[in-house]
Image: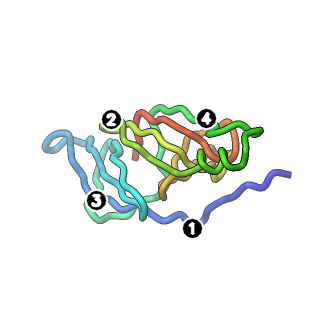
Amino acid sequence: MRVVRIFTFMKRLIVSAVEPYSVGDECASVTLCSEQAEIVAFSHQCDLKIGEKIENRLSILDGEVRSAYLSDWSDEAKKALSVHKLERIDHYAYRGTGQVINEPEGLVEVLGFIIDFGSVPCDGAVEFEIDRFDI
C-alpha cells in the first residue's frame, strides 16, 4: 500500500514585488517569497499587491522533472543528490532539486514552494527545469 503525504499546513507565499509589463498592462512579473527563497512568476490579469499572501501552489508553463538518482545508488549518493536547490536561469526559468510530496497530484516542494507539475515519474527527490512559473 502506498502512503501519500498531503501537506495541509502549506504556508502562503508573500508578494514582494509587482512589475507590470507597461502602465495599465494586465500582465506582470511578480516576485514571491517563501520562508527560504524567492522566485519571479508570470501573472496574467494581475491585481496582486505588495504584501499580499497567495496560495502556495504554483503552476508552470512548461517543465521537465526526473528522478534525482536511481534506486540502486548508495544512500550517501542519494542523500547528496536530495539537497533542495533552486537556480534562476532566465527571467522566468528555473532549475532545481526538490522533493515529491504528492505523487498522484504531481506536487513537488522546493525551498518552501509547492510546484504543480501535473504528474511526476517517481517518488522521492527529483531534479527539474521550468520555463515559467505562473500565478
Q: Which scheme is used to colour this image of the protein?
A: rainbow
Q: Are marks 3 and 2 in contact (CB under 8 Å)?
A: no
| Mark 3: amino acid | Ser
Residue 98 image position (x, y, % from top left) = 55, 48
Whole-angstrom CA distance, mark 3 to mark 4, is: 30 Å
| Mark 2: amino acid | Asp
Q: Describe the element under mark 4 as helix, strand or loop.
A: strand
Whole-angstrom CA distance, mark 3 to mark 1, is: 21 Å
Q: Which of marks 3 and 2 is in front?
A: 2
| Mark 1: amino acid | Phe
Question: Which residue is rendered at x = 30% and y = 37% of the image?
Answer: 91
Along the horizontal axis of the image, is 68 left or right of 41? right
Whole-angstrom CA distance, mark 3 to mark 2, is: 19 Å
Specify which label sits upstream in the sequence, 2 or 4. 4
Q: Describe the element under mark 2 as helix, strand or loop.
A: loop
Q: Looking at the picture, does residue 131 appear above or below residue 58?
A: above
Q: Which of 54 and 11 is in front in this view?
A: 11
Q: Describe the element under mark 1 as helix, strand or loop.
A: loop
Specify which label sits upstream in the sequence, 3 or 2. 3
Question: Which residue is rendered at x = 39% and y = 57% of the image?
Answer: 37
Q: Mark 3 points at which residue?
A: 16
Whole-angstrom CA distance, mark 2 to mark 4, is: 20 Å
What is the residue that sits farthest to the bottom in this orientation?
A: 9
Residue 135 image position (x, y, % from top left) = 40, 47
Q: Mark 2 points at which residue?
A: 90
Along the horizontal axis of the image, is 129 left or right of 40? right
Q: Looking at the picture, does residue 50 appear above or below residue 91?
A: below
Residue 64 image position (x, y, % from top left) = 54, 32
Question: Which residue is rendered at x = 30% and y = 49% of the image?
Answer: 30
| Mark 4: amino acid | Arg
Q: Name the residue under label 1.
A: 9
